[in-house]
């Protein structure tokens, strides 16, 4: 027999070795060195165990595997069992081999050379796994079934099994089978522990006692594993088949039972509570309700007023809440501790079998954890799966929610709802397309700034509320098969409502005006690409009542229209030459327009001009109401004391959505432009709170309007968008000048208001008022012109100036004719023509140039003044332009004083001709547009003053040059 | 004390002494309230008037006949106009009447008109009688004084007369007659007549 032979062999070896040991131990003086006696005892133990494993494998394991092959339910379990058995076998073999090697070379071993010590974690792991796989098999009655299935085989080998564990009692086969796979393994671990504790006694080495502890721990874990397994197995045989079927799972272990440590479920909802390693189960009759521990939170702070002697535990899960009551505080404590420890282990993904009572050594599970949960209850989230941060049963933090219909929300959650920034994909009826919302959410619905890219390729950028477009927003639809359009304006509960601009891209038509319920409704202006403009009143998309039509040939019709904007009915036609026709107009398809009325050929010039330059819209759309949807969220944010949260909410997610991205951007900005100022509201407040003077603020604003992260710059960008949506392209129409310039001035006022509010907030935080911008209330507007407009005008100037040029096109044309005429004159001829007093002629300058190849007669007099005036087009700031005019004046006076050789104060009689001279020589194009631009946008407090005077003088020169006598002058 | 800015424009034939009157008014008495001026064409002077300070912003105009059509640009927005004639030249009084007529038709509403019969030091060669001037002024509701820029006669009085005609500031409705409080201006639309 195999056992017998091995036994004799073992005896022989033992004798042989003990003689050697005696010699060695004499020489060993270092404590760390493991005596070869010990090595040998371990070697023997390993050898014996290996032999046992091999025998067990042949006798029992292979038979189990054979039996298992016909029991499909257990195949996987057995496979795992087999694997862990072999894993253990290999480990022992390796341990044996290394021991044998050193033993044969007669080497004493250092502690760290011992395989058992080197690989201690491996030993612990493999043994644990082995016991776990054995017990997995055991709890599902694997041994019981195997014993039944191959009963004849086991009957014949029953004796062998009994011998293997040296058992004398006559237990049933399945018990024996279980024991041969458990007892010797337990003993072997115990052997290791003994061996290590002997070593530790000899040596004080720290690592040794650590290793010993892990093995002691392992032993304890093994007992716990086995305990849990047998408890669980008992449970499965106690409860009804139906429940067992529903609950039994190889890896599931009973951890606590309300029959063992009593707790009751409040309101008697359930009669029994079972705590497993992975879930919490409530039983009622044959029914069970289980909760995955990963999504269970326990709150022990609840008290019941009516029953102060009940100790409560509130079990919170995503969709349910159960209250457990214990009569004893210890019971409550135990359940609380156990549930929490199991949650912690289940979250870590490994069991560590903590000891009850060692509360200080183990931590509770985090309240905020990454979990996955599929909602079942009726409601918005039904059948949606959430994956992400959860807290107290609710999505809270970052997460992803996926609905069964393909809807998908990724983003921030708070207290169970979408809150903060999120990206939501909603599948559209066309299968592979989605509506994509990148938006801010509040308590589960879209609110604040967002971008939506719809499946039909239209894009909305703007504000939302209650999941609907609400407030200011731009909807652009570019799909070529439909009518591409762009709407820039106000929304009310998903519908176009209030002031807005609609551009039909195919028709080249723009509607500027009021909306209601997605319809054109109220006063409006329509601009067409042929240059015609309409002003009228709309009702449900149709033009009603009387209106105005301005055609490009400067004909103006005031009267009745058809719904489709055709002249029809009573009206008055004013032709560009001032003739008027009052009568009844008709249009029919075959005859075109025909009319009956009175033609008046006595035209008043003034009347004609006011019609030709008729200004649309200014009274219809009060500037304060046009873009409230842009200013309001900004103001709310400022009024709320500039809380960071609201900042993101109104400006979009560029502020802080992606921290990583932002960092890299910040880095880039540092590289790119050192002048950037921070856009974070905290920094802004900090920065402006130290300002002492107006210049500080001015410098800061200069930078702010250039810093892409700054709220002001963002606001400016939006304003530029709406401005261009209205006034560029087909909107570049002289009839809109009034509206346009008024609007820009209003932007300036609003921005100033925001500056003030920021300063006030900064002041509040500092505890002292900042007085930079507070002065006389009457001065309030001045700052808008002196501080804000110069900074923002450059962005609007091209489009705005275009309107001025169109408005003054005719006058600028006449002026230019005059300039060309006067340009033909030599300097002296021109001075003479303008009747400049001879004594003021700067002939000294002319003489100076006689030797030069330049013509002596032209462009030499008042050269410095002329050059100075020409600089007027190098800036867009009205204030700077005015300074240039003032300087031009001083240059003229300087030249004259030089000529007459004394301080000469120019009276108007002298100044005007000289200024005309300089203007004609400077030859500035579109001077009329320039002058009126300056006049409209300069600080109004200049009116009547020195700058106004000079601007008027310049304007009168401009007027004068347009005169017939100059345009058609021939020398 | 509130400062009110009053735009005043000077009208009248060349040579009647417009510039001289302003020079006399502004420069005769040293006053730290005098602002920098544009030669002799634009000058300012601040004088007390009741509870207020009146800052006169005085705009000269070119007297040449061919620039006459440019005048409206200068007198628009004026609180007052000083129209000057030379008592020794009848035709300057005639021109004055033309200015008054124009102002009535095209000038700002409620503009205060002040007629100055200048060069009263030369009364030997007088061609316009004081009576004629006074009667005319009364008929149009204007102030009238005979002045001498040369001898500093009645120049201050001329402007004091204007000050008195400016209605005191009504907090609810200011600037209605072209007088403006510092930094405020009555509405001006872009649709201007050219
Ligand atoms: N005698 C006299 N001469 C004056 C008076 N005021 C101005 N002048 C002279 O009249 C001429 C024209 O004056 P000026 O102020 O240039 O008149 P303006 O063309 O109306 O501005 C100058 O020679 C002055 O010296 C005055 O009150 N008396
Ligand atoms: Mg003069």
Image (spheres, rainbow, N blue to C red):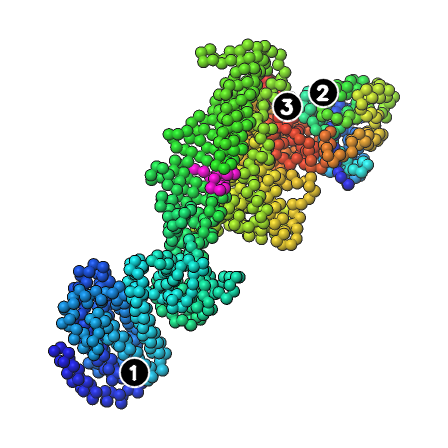
Checking the image for residue B105, the label placed there is 2
The residue segment tinted magenta is A459-474
Q: CA distance from mark 1 to mark 3?
A: 113 Å
Judge: label 3 CB < 8 Å from ligand 2. Answer: no
Place of residue B192 in the rendered image (x, y in percent of width and height, measured from the top left): 63, 25
Structural crowding at the residue carrying mark 3, measured as other residues with C-alpha within 10 Å and reported as few (<14), some (14–19) or many (≥20) = few
- Image quadrant of residue A870? top right
> Which of the two residues, A240 or A867, is positioned nearer the viewer here?
A240
Query: The numbered mark 3 sits on a residue in which chain?
Result: B
Look at 30% across and 87% down and name the residue there: A29
Q: Which residue is mark 1?
A: A33
Look at 64% across and 46% down and name the residue there: A694
Judge: label 1 CB < 8 Å from ligand 2. Answer: no
Sequence order check, earlier mark of 2 and 3: 2
Please give left or right for residue B155 compared with residue A21 in the image: right
Q: Which residue is mark 3?
A: B193
Place of residue A590 in the rendered image (x, y in percent of width and height, measured from the top left): 44, 11
Main SS of residues in magenta:
strand
Image depth: mark 1 or mark 3 in front: 1
Which type of secondary structure does the marked residue at label 2 adopt? Answer: helix
Place of residue A337 in the rendered image (x, y in percent of width and height, measured from the top left): 42, 67
């Amino acid at each position: 027999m195999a056992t017998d032979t091995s036994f004799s062999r073992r005896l022989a070896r033992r004798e042989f070795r003990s003689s050697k040991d005696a010699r060695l131990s004499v020489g060993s003086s270092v404590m760390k060195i493991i005596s070869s006696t010990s090595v040998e005892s371990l070697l023997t133990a390993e050898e014996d165990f290996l032999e046992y494993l091999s025998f067990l494998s042949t006798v029992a394991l292979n038979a189990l595997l054979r039996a298992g092959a016909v029991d499909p339910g257990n195949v996987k379990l057995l496979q795992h069992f087999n694997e862990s058995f072999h894993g253990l076998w290999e480990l022992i073999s390796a341990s044996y081999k290394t021991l044998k090697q050193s033993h044969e070379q007669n080497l004493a071993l250092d502690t760290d050379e011992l395989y058992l010590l080197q690989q201690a974690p491996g030993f612990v792991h493999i043994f644990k796994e082995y016991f776990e796989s054995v017990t997995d098999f055991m709890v599902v009655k694997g041994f019981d079934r195997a014993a039944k299935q191959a009963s004849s085989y086991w009957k014949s080998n029953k004796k062998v099994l009994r011998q293997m564990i040296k058992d004398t009692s006559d237990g049933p086969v399945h018990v024996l089978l279980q024991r041969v796979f458990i007892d010797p393994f337990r003993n072997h671990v115990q052997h290791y522990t003994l061996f290590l504790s002997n070593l530790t006694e000899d040596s004080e080495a720290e690592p040794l006692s650590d290793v010993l502890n892990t093995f002691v721990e392992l032993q304890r874990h093994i007992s716990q594993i086995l305990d849990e397994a047998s408890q669980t197995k008992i449970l499965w045989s106690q409860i009804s088949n139906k429940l067992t079927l529903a609950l039994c799972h190889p890896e599931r272990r009973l951890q606590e039972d309300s029959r063992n440590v009593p707790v009751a479920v409040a309101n008697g909802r359930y009669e029994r509570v079972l705590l497993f390693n992975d879930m919490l189960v409530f039983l009622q009759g044959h029914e069970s309700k289980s909760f995955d521990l990963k999504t269970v939170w326990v709150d022990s702070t609840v008290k019941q007023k009516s029953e102060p002697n009940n100790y409560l535990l509130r079990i919170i899960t995503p969709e349910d809440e159960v209250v457990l009551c214990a009569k004893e505080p210890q019971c409550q404590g135990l359940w609380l501790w156990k549930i929490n420890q199991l949650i912690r282990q289940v979250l870590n993904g490994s069991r560590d079998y903590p000891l009850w009572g060692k509360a200080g050594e183990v931590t509770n599970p985090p309240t905020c954890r990454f979990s996955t949960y599929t909602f079942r209850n009726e409601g918005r989230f039904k059948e949606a799966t959430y994956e992400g941060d959860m807290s107290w049963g609710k999505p809270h933090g970052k997460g992803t929610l996926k609905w069964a219909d393909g809807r998908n929300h990724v983003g921030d959650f708070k207290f169970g709802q979408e809150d903060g920034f999120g990206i939501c994909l909603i599948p559209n009826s066309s299968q592979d397309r989605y509506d994509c919302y990148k938006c801010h959410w509040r308590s589960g619905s879209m609110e604040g700034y967002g971008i939506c890219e719809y499946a039909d390729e239209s894009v909305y950028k703007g504000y939302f509320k209650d999941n609907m477009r609400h407030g200011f927003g731009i909807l652009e639809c570019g799909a070529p098969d439909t009518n591409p359009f762009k709407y820039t304006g106000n929304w009310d509960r998903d519908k176009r409502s209030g002031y807005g601009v609609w551009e039909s891209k195919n028709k080249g038509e723009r509607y500027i005006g009021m909306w209601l319920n997605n319809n054109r409704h109220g006063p409006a202006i329509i601009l067409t690409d042929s240059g015609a403009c309409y002003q009228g009143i709309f009702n449900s998309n149709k033009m009603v009542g009387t209106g105005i039509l301005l055609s490009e040939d400067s004909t103006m019709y005031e009267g009745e229209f058809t719904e489709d904007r055709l002249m029809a009915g009573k009206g008055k036609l004013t032709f560009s030459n001032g003739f008027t026709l009052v009568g009844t107009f008709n249009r029919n398809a075959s005859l075109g327009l025909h009319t009956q009325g009175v033609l008046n050929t006595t035209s008043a010039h003034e009347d004609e001009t006011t019609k030709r330059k008729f200004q649309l819209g200014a009274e219809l759309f009060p500037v304060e109401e046009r873009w409230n949807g842009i200013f309001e969220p900004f103001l709310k944010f400022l009024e709320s004391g500039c809380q960071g949260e609201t900042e993101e909410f109104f400006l979009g997610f560029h502020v802080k959505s992606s921290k990583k991205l932002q960092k890299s951007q910040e880095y880039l900005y540092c590289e790119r432009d050192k002048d950037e100022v921070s856009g974070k509201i905290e920094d802004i407040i900090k920065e402006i709170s130290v300002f002492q003077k107006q210049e500080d603020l001015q410098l800061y604003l200069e930078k702010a309007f250039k810093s892409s992260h700054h709220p002001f710059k963002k606001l400016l960008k939006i304003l530029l968008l709406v401005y261009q949506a209205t006034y560029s392209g087909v909107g570049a129409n002289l009839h809109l000048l009034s509206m346009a310039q008024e609007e820009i001035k209003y932007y300036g006022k609003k921005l100033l208001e925001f500056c003030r509010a920021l300063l006030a907030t900064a002041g509040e935080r500092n505890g002292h008022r900042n007085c930079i911008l507070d002065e006389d209330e009457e001065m309030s507007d001045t700052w808008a012109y002196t501080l804000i407009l110069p900074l923002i005008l450059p962005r609007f100037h091209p489009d705005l100036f275009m309107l001025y040029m169109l408005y003054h096109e005719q006058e600028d044309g006449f002026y230019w004719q005059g300039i060309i005429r006067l340009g033909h004159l030599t300097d002296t001829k021109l001075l003479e023509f303008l009747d400049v007093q001879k004594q003021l002629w700067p002939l000294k300058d002319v003489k100076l140039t006689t030797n030069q190849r330049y013509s002596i007669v032209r462009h030499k007099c008042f050269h410095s003044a002329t050059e100075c005036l020409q600089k007027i087009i190098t800036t867009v700031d009205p204030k700077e332009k005015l300074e240039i005019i003032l300087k031009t004046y001083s240059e003229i006076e300087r030249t004259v004083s030089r000529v007459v050789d004394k301080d000469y104060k120019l009276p108007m009689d002298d100044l005007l001709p000289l200024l005309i001279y300089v203007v004609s020589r400077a030859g500035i194009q579109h001077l009329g547009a320039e002058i009126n631009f300056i006049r409209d946008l300069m600080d109004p407090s200049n009116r009547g003053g020195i700058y106004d005077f000079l601007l008027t003088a310049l304007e009168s020169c401009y007027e004068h040059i347009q005169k017939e006598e100059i345009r058609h002058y021939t020398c | 004390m509130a400062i009110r800015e009053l735009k005043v424009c000077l009208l009248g034939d060349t040579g009647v002494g417009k510039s001289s009157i302003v020079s006399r008014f502004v420069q005769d008495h040293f006053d730290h309230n005098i602002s920098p001026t544009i030669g002799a064409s634009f000058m300012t002077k601040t004088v007390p008037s009741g509870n207020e300070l009146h800052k006169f912003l005085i705009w000269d105009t070119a007297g040449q006949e061919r620039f006459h059509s440019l005048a409206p640009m200068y007198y628009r927005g004026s609180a007052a106009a000083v129209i000057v004639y030379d008592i020794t030249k009848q035709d300057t009084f005639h021109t004055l009447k033309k200015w008054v007529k124009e102002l009535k038709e095209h000038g700002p509403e409620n503009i205060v008109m002040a007629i100055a019969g200048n060069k009263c030091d030369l009364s030997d060669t007088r061609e316009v009688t004081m009576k004629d001037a006074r009667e005319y002024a009364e008929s149009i509701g204007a102030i009238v004084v005979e002045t001498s820029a040369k001898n500093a006669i009645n120049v201050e009085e001329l402007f004091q007369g204007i000050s008195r005609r400016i209605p005191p500031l009504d907090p609810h409705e200011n600037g209605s007659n072209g007088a403006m409080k510092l930094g405020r201006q009555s509405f001006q639309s872009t649709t201007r007549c050219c």
